[in-house]
Amino acid sequence: MPYEYRKLSPKEREEVVEARRQRGFPLHQPPHPFREAGSYLITAANFEHAPIMAAPERRTEFQEILLERFREIQAEIVGWVILPNHYNILVNIDSLDTLSSVIQSLHGFTSHQWNQRDGLTGKRKVWYRF
């Protein structure tokens, strides 16, 4: 059954975390134990899955920026999909650490740009995590 974590009471949150622990699931996010060269499927969502990239023009613009940034670090891009509220990209990369800094920069750049364009500077969180 889906739930909205922020709307749960502290006791309900504790129960959800304990149920995840008992099932062997990550408590709030997946761990990233491997950081060396390899293939990685990166997923990032807009905060609360808001459809911030609903406009096809915004998705096209984001695609261009995303692919350019990944090419700058010599990532081999295997495939990608950009949807209204999240994206996935499959890449071969030398280091997850390099990838992390690129994504943080990408998310910072697009957050600033889109909030400015949409008149929501300081009022909206664009990205969750990746």
Image (cartoon, rainbow, N blue to C red):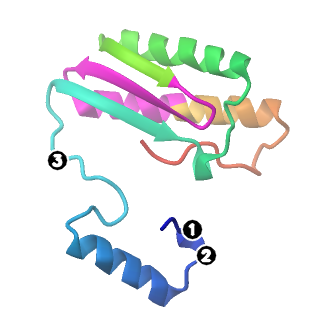
Residue at 63% across, 14% down: 60
Numbered-mark total: 3
Residue, disc 2: 7
Q: Which amino acid type is marked by label 1? A: Glu
Q: How far is mark 3 from mark 1, CA to CA?
A: 27 Å
Could you say which is closer to the camera, residue 50 or residue 36?
A: 50
Instruction: State yes or no: residue 57 in magenta.
Output: no
Residue at 78% across, 43% down: 121
Residue at 18% across, 37% down: 35
Residue, disc 3: 33
| Residue range of the region highlighted in magenta in the rendering | 82-106
Q: Secondary structure at mark 1?
A: loop
Q: Which mark is residue 118?
A: none
Could you say which is closer to the camera, residue 74 or residue 42?
A: 42
Instruction: State yes or no: residue 105 in magenta.
Output: yes
Q: Are marks 2 and 1 in contact (CB under 8 Å)?
A: yes
